[in-house]
Image (cartoon, rainbow, N blue to C red):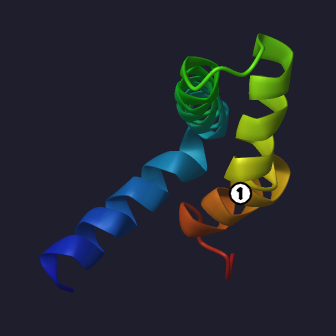
Amino acid sequence: MGGVTLQRFWSRLRCLFRRSEAEREMNREMDAHLALMTDDFENSGMPPAQARLAARRAYGGVEQAKELHRDERSFVWL
Protein backbone atom coordinates (compact mmCIF):
# COMPACT_ATOMS: atom_id res chain seq x y z
CA MET A 1 0.00 0.00 0.00
CA GLY A 2 1.21 3.48 -0.77
CA GLY A 3 1.38 6.22 1.85
CA VAL A 4 -1.88 7.90 0.85
CA THR A 5 -3.69 4.58 0.49
CA LEU A 6 -2.51 3.39 3.90
CA GLN A 7 -3.54 6.70 5.45
CA ARG A 8 -6.98 6.39 3.84
CA PHE A 9 -7.29 2.81 5.14
CA TRP A 10 -6.59 3.89 8.73
CA SER A 11 -8.96 6.82 8.39
CA ARG A 12 -11.73 4.53 7.16
CA LEU A 13 -11.05 2.02 9.91
CA ARG A 14 -11.23 4.79 12.52
CA CYS A 15 -14.55 6.00 11.06
CA LEU A 16 -15.92 2.48 11.18
CA PHE A 17 -15.73 2.54 14.97
CA ARG A 18 -16.47 6.24 15.50
CA ARG A 19 -19.41 6.87 13.21
CA SER A 20 -21.18 9.42 15.38
CA GLU A 21 -17.97 11.44 15.77
CA ALA A 22 -17.37 11.31 12.02
CA GLU A 23 -20.97 12.43 11.37
CA ARG A 24 -20.61 15.38 13.74
CA GLU A 25 -17.35 16.41 12.10
CA MET A 26 -18.85 16.15 8.61
CA ASN A 27 -21.87 18.24 9.68
CA ARG A 28 -19.59 20.89 11.22
CA GLU A 29 -17.51 21.07 8.04
CA MET A 30 -20.54 21.37 5.77
CA ASP A 31 -22.18 23.95 8.04
CA ALA A 32 -18.97 25.99 8.05
CA HIS A 33 -18.71 25.79 4.27
CA LEU A 34 -22.35 26.86 3.83
CA ALA A 35 -21.82 29.70 6.32
CA LEU A 36 -18.84 31.00 4.34
CA MET A 37 -20.81 30.84 1.11
CA THR A 38 -23.75 32.60 2.78
CA ASP A 39 -21.40 35.34 4.00
CA ASP A 40 -20.07 35.78 0.48
CA PHE A 41 -23.59 36.21 -0.90
CA GLU A 42 -24.52 38.62 1.89
CA ASN A 43 -21.36 40.63 1.24
CA SER A 44 -22.42 40.92 -2.39
CA GLY A 45 -25.64 42.60 -1.23
CA MET A 46 -28.17 39.79 -0.78
CA PRO A 47 -30.52 39.77 2.21
CA PRO A 48 -29.65 36.99 4.74
CA ALA A 49 -32.54 34.64 3.90
CA GLN A 50 -31.87 34.90 0.17
CA ALA A 51 -28.14 34.46 0.76
CA ARG A 52 -28.76 31.20 2.68
CA LEU A 53 -30.89 29.85 -0.16
CA ALA A 54 -28.34 30.90 -2.76
CA ALA A 55 -25.55 29.19 -0.78
CA ARG A 56 -27.50 25.92 -0.58
CA ARG A 57 -28.22 26.08 -4.32
CA ALA A 58 -24.60 26.83 -5.14
CA TYR A 59 -23.38 24.03 -2.86
CA GLY A 60 -25.72 21.51 -4.43
CA GLY A 61 -27.51 18.64 -2.73
CA VAL A 62 -26.36 18.61 0.89
CA GLU A 63 -27.73 15.13 1.59
CA GLN A 64 -26.18 13.77 -1.61
CA ALA A 65 -22.84 15.27 -0.63
CA LYS A 66 -23.14 13.64 2.81
CA GLU A 67 -23.81 10.24 1.21
CA LEU A 68 -20.79 10.61 -1.07
CA HIS A 69 -18.66 11.57 1.91
CA ARG A 70 -19.93 8.59 3.91
CA ASP A 71 -19.09 6.27 1.01
CA GLU A 72 -15.63 7.80 0.71
CA ARG A 73 -14.81 7.29 4.38
CA SER A 74 -16.22 3.77 4.70
CA PHE A 75 -15.51 0.28 3.53
CA VAL A 76 -18.32 0.02 0.98
CA TRP A 77 -17.67 -3.69 0.50
CA LEU A 78 -18.40 -4.53 4.17
> Image check: 23 left or right of 6?
right
Direction left: furthest residue: 3
Q: Vertical placement of 53 versus 71: above or below?
A: above
Residue 8 lies in quadrant = bottom left
**Amino acid type indicated by mark 1:** Ala
The mark tally for this picture is 1
- Location of the C terminus (image quadrant): bottom right
Residue that sits furthest to the top in the current view? 48
State the residue at coordinates (75%, 26%).
51
Q: Left or right: 16 with respect to 47?
A: left
Q: Position of residue 13 (x, y in %)?
A: 46, 57
- Residue under the image location 81 percent in, 55 percent down: 61
**Residue 48 falls in image quadrant:** top right
Q: Nearer the viewer, residue 46 or 7?
A: 46
Residue 67, horizontal then vertical, whole percent? 76, 59
Q: Is residue 5 left or right of residue 20?
A: left
- The structure residue drawn at horizontal position 71% and vertical position 57%, both measured from the top left corner, is 65
Residue under the point 66% across and 57% down: 70
Percent x, y of residue 27: 65, 31
User: From the image, which quarter does the N terminus lie in?
Assistant: bottom left
Q: Is residue 6 depicted above or below 69 in this figure?
A: below
Q: For mark 1, does the 10 Å Cα neighbourhood hold few (<14), some (14 to 19), or many (20 or more) residues?
A: few
Q: Is 64 placed left or right of 35 in the picture?
A: right
In this orientation, which residue lies closer to the viewer: 46 or 11?
A: 46
Residue 68 x/y as whole percent:
68, 65
In the image shown, does 72 or 51 lie closer to the viewer? 51
Helix, strand or loop under label 1: helix
Residue identified by numbered label 1 = 65
